[in-house]
Amino acid sequence: MTSNDGNHGHHISQQFNADLEEAKKHMLEMGGLVEKQFADSLTAVIEADSSLGTRVIAEDDVLDGMEMKIDEECNLIIARRQPAARDLRLVLAIIKAIRDLERIGDESSKIAKAAIKMSEHREFPDGVVDFRSLGDKVQRMVNMALDAFARYDAEAAIQVAHEDKNVDAEYAIAMRSMVTHMMEDPTTISQVLDVLWALRAMERIGDHA
């Protein structure tokens, strides 16, 4: 009797691990799409590519669908496998991760919308260098966060949190630079505001990474 219970428990554990790995795989696939969407939104701004910006916005619906599917997967795992506390935390971590990824997708769409507006101006105000630098840092953060999750690497996750402080500091410097630019040349206010919204969206992406 004890032996049968043990075998049953082992079987349940194997099923849970397989289900968890499948959900994790789907989450990382979603993460890959989010990375591409964010990178494309940055390119759309820097190259004034409105058509690319439009494609980025369209991809947001795909991300929303992926989030719903993975969330349902995780809820089924909890209902069917009734995982113990440690295993439950892993499932909940995936649920939190996909919500953060969905929000990063939303912020990338905001950057893309700013890119479409900025493409109308043709010339960018000073501060695009700050934009590129901040974008590179946030891209690294998102990549590091996904890599840390894939390897369940707690130390790498802590490093991502440290990087967020650097992003916040650079964001503050860029914001001051853009505000100063508007004060010195009021004719650029409309253009600069578009850059500001995009910078703000990037800073929020760093918060969700």
Image: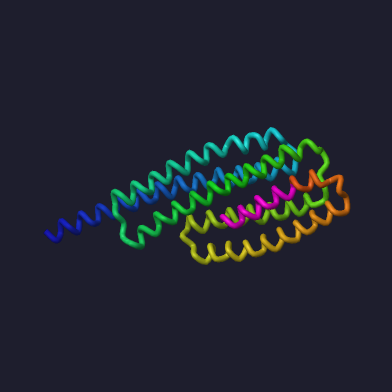
Q: Is residue 12 magenta?
A: no
Q: 200 above or below 161? A: above
Q: Quadrant of the C terminus?
A: bottom right
Q: 65 above or below 174? A: above
Seen in the image, is 63 located left or right of residue 52? Answer: left
What segment is highlighted magenta in the picture?
Answer: 195-209
* Residue sitting farthest toward the top: 51
User: Which colour style is shown?
Assistant: rainbow
Name the quadrant containing residue 106: top right
Q: 162 above or below 188? A: below
Name the quadrant containing residue 37: top right
Q: 50 above or below 176? A: above
Q: In the image, residue 87 lies at what x, y percent?
A: 35, 59
**Prevalent SS, magenta region:** helix
* Residue sitting farthest toward the left: 1
* Residue at screen point 59% across, 47% down: 35
Seen in the image, is 186 located left or right of residue 196? Answer: right
Q: In the image, residue 66 lies at what x, y percent?
A: 47, 41
Q: Count the numbered circles shown.
A: 0
Q: Is residue 197 magenta?
A: yes
Q: In the image, residue 39 lies at what x, y percent?
A: 64, 45
* Residue at screen point 32% across, 52% down: 16
Seen in the image, is 69 located left or right of residue 179? Answer: left
Q: In the image, residue 153 lies at what x, y percent?
A: 49, 62
The one nearer the camera, 59 or 29, is: 59
* Residue at screen point 55% across, 43% down: 33
* Residue at screen point 25% across, 56% down: 10
